[in-house]
Amino acid sequence: MENVVLTIHLILALLLIGVVLLQRSEGGGLGIGGGGGTVSARGAATALTKLTWIFASAFIVTSIALTVLATRGGQGGSVVDSVATDAAPAPAEAPATPALGGDLLPPSTSDAPATPPRADAPAPATAPATTPTPNP
């Protein structure tokens, strides 16, 4: 039953979008479209306007029907209550993290900024055991 109402709801949504896009603009806030005179009398509702009201009303009815169908099969409790009872208890003692002390930057030999290696210099085969000195 829920799938049938959901399918009708989606079809109504697409029809409502299509009917609204087919309607003529009345000027709106952008100042585009609309009538040619300074004062335009708005006549009786056109077929598209009536169709829009019908689709919008049916869309609201199917929205309420889907809400009722979704809550009918649900339990009386809250989602938060079910998560709180299913959750595993937290460990009593968290593992200790080592204290980070001092400077987290690599050691440098001078206050000069680090420079990348020259493009024509050969790449080292292995990482050096000590920090390299900057190239002059």
Image (spheres, rainbow, N blue to C red):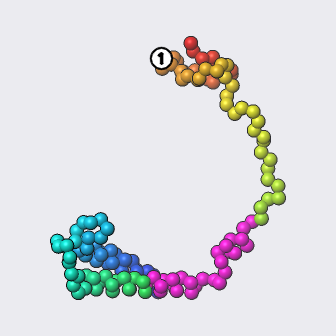
Locate residue 36: give its quadrant. Answer: bottom left
Question: How dense is the environment of label 1, judged by Cα within 10 Å: few (below 14), some, or many (20 and up)?
Answer: few
Where disc 1 sits, the SS reads loop
Q: Which residue is drawn at 28% across and 86% down?
A: 50
Residue at figure coordinates x 29%, y 65% from the top left: 30
Q: Circle 1 is placed at which residue position? A: 120
The overriding secondary structure of the stretch rendered in magenta is helix
Report whether residue 57 is seen.
yes
Q: Residue at x 20, y 78 (%)?
A: 40
> In the rendering, at what x and y percent does residue 43 appear?
21, 84
The residue lying toward the viewer, choosing from 103 and 37, is: 37
Confirm whether the magenta stretch covers residue 59: no
Whether the magenta-drawn stretch holds residue 70 is answered as yes
Residue 126 image point, x, y percent = 61, 23
Q: Where is residue 66 in the image (x, y as percent from the top left)?
A: 48, 83
Q: 71 or 126: which is nearer to us?
A: 71
- The foreground one among 96 and 41 is 41
Residue at the spot 47% in from the left edge and 85% down from the top edge: 64
Examine the rendered structure and indicate whether residue 28 appears above or below residue 129: below
Work out whether 122 lies above or below 89: above
Quarter the C terminus occupies: top right
Segment tinted magenta in the rendering: 62-88
Say whether residue 108 is left or right of residue 14: right
Left or right? Give the position of 126 relative to 60. Answer: right
Can you see residue 11? no
Q: Provide residue 96's location: percent of width, then percent of height.
A: 80, 47
Amino acid tagged 1: Asp
